[in-house]
Amino acid sequence: MDEQNIPIDINTGKLLEWLISRRQVGKDYVENIMKVREKINNAIQDMPAHEGIVKLLSGQHINYFHCLKIIDILKETEADTKNLFGRYGSQRMKDWQDILGSYQKDNVYLAEVAQMLIRNVSYEIPSLKKQLLKLESNQLECEKKLKDYSKAEQAALNEFNTICKQLGIEGKDIKRELVKLLDELPEIYEKVTQHIKTLEPTLNLYDAFFTFQLGNNPMDVMVLLKYLIQNGNTTTYEYIYGEKPIQIETPPLNITFDDEKMDENNETIDFGDDIDFGEENIQIETSNEGEIDWGSLTNTDDDFEIVDHVDLDINLEESGIVVEKSGLDGGIAKNDKALTILDNPKTQDQVLNDLIELRAFLIMRLYEMSSESNVLTMTQLDVPTILQMQTLETITALLDSVNAALNELTNKRVQHLHNVKHSAKYVDLLAGNLKQKLVLVQRMKDNKVLLEEKINEIREEMKKVQPVIVKTVQYTKWLQKEIEGDISKKYKGRTVNIVGSVNMV
């Protein structure tokens, strides 16, 4: 096979070694290149105003092939300095011809462009591509965070709206809206009172049972429930003293509204972004079903709390109640004595205890009547008629009535409104919880703005890097073509291929 037809394949990374081993380039090429670069730096200080030269010099590393084009342009711009012997008198032309000669000596130019080619393929282009990949990765990460922030923002907003809907407020002025809900309490307590009045047969049964069990030492039980059935939901004062007060001084709500929380300099107090409610404070949270845990009662397995009876015997002087004359004409009800029985936390607890006690009594009667352990058998002739007449059906009906009254008084909304009225701390915590949702919403919005700005910055940076990569790749391919052509000339036109990594850029 004719050697002329055999192509010369040179690996990109071994190009310089190949040139040195074939004695196309001297081993001292680095020093010679530096001398040529110095001459180029001096020469470009004085160049003619020509569009082609400006284009060649703009943002490019001048090499031997550029010098050839510059000389071609100077042949036009410096044509008037040419003498009869074809030589140019222009210093510019002389400088660039000298540069060209230095390049051609020992093929310094070939070593330089080979060096450029290797550097672009091995370092410049991979570095630029890595930078672009990093920017793309950062952009994807920011876009993912942007979605996460949007989800968190929407979730917090939904929780806020859900709680407000359950509370029955708009959420614009939380504390005042909560206080306004207290107008519902009188109607609610009246409804509860009507349910309690239906329990009179149950109380009669309970009284008969106690009297039968205690024999000659009966005791008055369920005094407060009996009072509610007979008199309704009166003031605590009337319940204690048996007379209506001539004046009721309703205790004020100890709630400080947000616009009233001012520091010594009349500036709004900043509670910070995160409010630590502490371990002993009420926790106001939403359950998985989106319902609010109002956190008023400590529930037992039967969903009710057993509270000790409260001693309501009050010393008049200590209670702050003003009694006219002997008290028969009524006095002034103050503090918690001005509250109704169901509105007063102490008497409400006693009502709840009585209802729970009645409930437990009826449940026990159902158990006894459905088993052989019924302590009230028909063989006992002294058992009261009211007890003997009871059946599973009648006891179940009585139990349903008690449960209905309990449910009315212990449902979440009633307990929530009760806590709002009697616990400023509860209101602060509830309002703080809602405000935290809004703080989170605003924080997510601010984070989204910052992320969007960052994404725009990344996109702008990518727009700058992408053209550089394209230009560098094109320049590298051009160098490859020029080097292949130049080496081919040195080997009588044989085909030269620079193979390897240069073909994968």
Image (cartoon, rainbow, N blue to C red):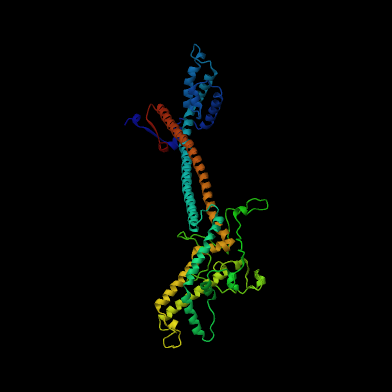
Image quarter where the N terminus lies is top left
For residue 199, side relative to residue 252 (left or right): left
443 versus 33 height, above or below: below
The one nearer the camera, 68 or 76, is 76
Q: Where the C terminus falls, by quadrant?
A: top left
As displayed, is residue 211 above or below residue 77?
below
Residue 381 lies, in percent from the top left, at: 44, 88
Q: Nearer the viewer, residue 455 or 318?
A: 318
Residue 410 is at least partly visible in this image: no
Foreground: 96 or 229?
229
Please state the total of marks drawn on the protein image: 0
**Residue 419 shows in this picture:** yes
Q: Residue at x 35, y 32 (%)?
A: 6
Whole-percent x, y for residue 502 in the image: 42, 36
Quadrant in the rendering for residue 236: bottom right
Q: Position of residue 261 (x, y in %)?
A: 63, 54
Instruction: Give x and y (percent) for residue 436.
Output: 54, 54
Direction left: furthest residue: 1
Instruction: Say which quarter of the image contains residue 182.
Output: bottom right
Query: Which residue is painted at 54% across and 85% down in the image?
Result: 217
